Image (cartoon, rainbow, N blue to C red):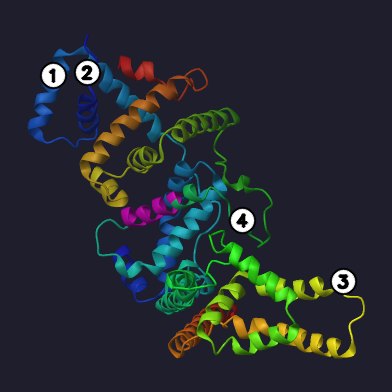
Amino acid sequence: MDEIALIQLAQKGDLDSFNRLVLAYQDALFNTTLRILGDEDLAADATQEAFLSAFRAINTYRGGSFKAWLLRIATNACYDELRRKQRRPTTPLEPETDDGEEMESPRWLADPSDSPEEELEREELEHAIQHCLNDLPADFRSVVVLADIQGLDYREVATALRKPLGTIKSRLARARLRLRECLQGFRELLPAAFRLEEERAT
Amino acid sequence: MKSPTLRDLDLLSAYLDGELPPAERTRLLTRIESDPALRAALDDLRQVRTVLRRTPQRRAPRNFTLSAKMARIRPPVPRLVPVLSWVSAVATLLFVCTFAANLLPILAGPLAAAERPLPGVGGGYGGGDGNAPEAAYLEEEAATEAPAEMETFVMEAPMAPEPTAGTEQMADSGIPDQTATAAPAALAPAPEPTAAERQSDDQANGAVEEMPSLKEPEPRLTPLQTGLLALALILGAVALLVRGGRIWQFKRRSRK
């Protein structure tokens, strides 16, 4: 079933249809909230809150990019979390094995194809990026996360953040400039991924 | 080599994302070819974008699908809402009106008394004004005169306008109580009061004890004030009931 049909059914109150949309977008929303908040637990809370808000407000969706619409709600949830600066107590839901038993560690998230070196490299890159993102003001962070990490175009980012295109352009440029300065400090830590000099030469 | 301005950076960043209009894009390309600083800045922006696009994507740590229970639960009403509801607002307004109406006579009392002409006994008893010696004289006289006279004075007080004014001021300043206690104290040196004197003393004391009730007019609410107060209480109770009902309704939904 296509996305529009699922949205229309969800607008009529069909929870199963909405949950299919949740499964389709939960990774995108979680990654967005994770990069904006910089904390997995807060990101999970914000993602859950965003989907709950989206279900309640599904009738206000009037077309356009559904992903951008969802990301707008997720970004607002992140801003709420940032304002709150306080974690709500939550019950962690552990992933289950094929037998239905709970797994104690979320190591199932790791890609089994990665070698230990690749995994380490990936973790270092992620750590460096997250560190530099955390140094940005929240407004700049959300723009760069949506545009460069989620791959939204300027109009979608403007829709998601409810800001004029000009604001998105200038914030993205300044955020990139500041990230460039920050990431330079991690060049030795990230030899394989951060090949700025090689890219410059090509 | 001149470093690019912020405006140049905006243009370079938009050019990188293919978001520049054709005319602007052509102009910028011409400048990039001739300006190494712009070229370097463009490279920097491109490299940052490349790194950001390589940011590892995580899988969601769990499914965020909604259960029927989660979808049905409505958030509790924010606490400010009942405070700002019209019932509470009206109740508060009426309460303030009632309070102000009760306060007015108290505030106006001393002013009215001060403006009232009081020959003989002044109105400012204990107020530190020029009538203090006269008041002291009255106190002394009350202490030395026979209690029977005091009784007469007390009984006649409400009827006579001028003494009433004086005694009202005495009552306001709290002096009558002092007078009442001072009178027996002043008479204490008398060696052995006779039975008739004791009786008359008792009568006098009884009368003096009644003085406050006679001298201090109880602040009474007008029917309008009483009505407003009752209305405020009723509306306040309604606000509480409504709030309680909503909480009960929310808990009932949550249990389902």
Q: How much space separates mark 4 and mark 3, taking CA atoms?
A: 97 Å
Task: Determine if marks 4 and 2 fall on one subunit.
Answer: no
Q: How much space separates mark 1 and mark 4, taking CA atoms?
A: 55 Å
Q: How much space separates mark 1 and mark 3, taking CA atoms?
A: 115 Å
Query: Magenta span: helix, strand or loop, mainly?
Result: helix
Neighbours of disc 1 within 10 Å: few (<14), some (14-19), many (20+): few
Mark 2 — residue? B38
Indicate the quadrant containing the N terminus of chain B: top left, top right, bottom left or bottom right. top left
> Mark 4: which amino acid?
Pro
Q: Going from the N terminus, do you reach mark 2 or mark 1 first? A: 1
In percent of width and height, residue A101 lies at 68, 60
Which label sits in the foreground, 4 or 3? 3
In percent of width and height, residue B147 lies at 75, 83
Q: Chain of mark 1?
A: B
Q: How much space separates mark 2 and mark 1, taking CA atoms?
A: 8 Å
Kindly identify which numbered label has been placed on residue B189: 3
Mark 4 — residue? A95
Residue sitting at x 25%, y 65%: A62
Which label sits in the foreground, 1 or 4? 1
Q: Chain of mark 3?
A: B
Mark 1 — residue? B31
